[in-house]
Amino acid sequence: MGMQLMRASSFHHHLLHPQSTSTPPAKALFGLEQVNIRSVVNIKRRNRYYGIVASSNLASPLWDSWRPEKGSAAPSLSDIVWPSAGAFAAMALLGRMDQILAPKGISMTIAPLGAVSAVLFATPAAPGARKYNMFMAQIGCAAIGVLAFSTFGPGWLARSFALAASVAFMICTRSTHPPAASLPILFIDGAKFHNLSFWYALFPGAAGCLLLCLIQEIVLYLKDNFKF
């Protein structure tokens, strides 16, 4: 009987004075938020475990990389002509230098410089077109190719080691420049470059990039000032 009277008085007290409840509203709300957060986290973990994905995102990872970049505007005529002209001029000058260097048995026109031309003229704002990335990667990866050939000789082991070490070098130095990854393989398989030894780190890769950078500056000037 006494317990019932105490419960009744407590009930009337809560009705008349709701602000004096044992659990403050802020704490109660905070506790509710914690419960909600835990519930959401648990649901996400469960979905990830069972492979449950929102239906609107199912096609994104599979097809997005096969489509043109979203929001990119169609290139103008000057955006096509000037970079193409720059690439033509670059290969023409390198070819002329090949004629001069032919008696010495070396060449300036190497495949990696074609890839460098595409990066510099078509995507000048890309990370791979940064001068630091380009020269750090060109010099470092070429030296790695010479070192791999000196250690393992010609063959698949030298190529595999050189490529893996080049990728690691570019990541460590934050100088990602994809065309440079082909320089070690070019040296290992190209007997005409073996006489250069560690000079291969500077020629023809880095030396050719100097010429391409000069042509790029001309192309960018023409592209900015002569639009059509």
Image (cartoon, grey):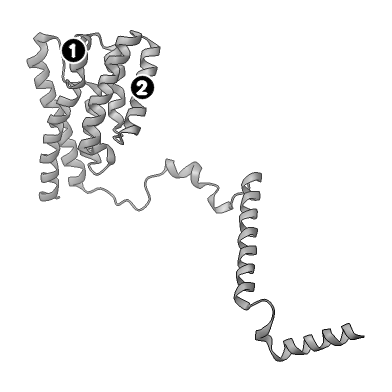
Element type where label 1 sits in the image: helix
Residue to which mark 2 is pinned: 163
Instruction: Out of 66 and 188, give the one closest to the viewer.
Output: 188
Q: Residue furthest bottom?
A: 16
Residue to which mark 1 is pinned: 196
* Residue 213 in picture, x, y percent from top left: 15, 35
* Residue 23 in picture, x, y percent from top left: 67, 76
Q: Amino acid at mark 2?
A: Leu
In percent of the image, x 18 and y 39: which residue is there? 83
The vertical placement of 70 against 86, above or below, is below
Tell me where residue 209 sits by quadrant: top left
In percent of the image, x 65 and y 85: which residue is there? 19
* Residue 33 in picture, x, y percent from top left: 61, 67
Q: Is residue 195 left or right of residue 153?
A: left
* Residue 177 in picture, x, y percent from top left: 29, 33
Q: Is residue 22 left or right of residue 143?
A: right
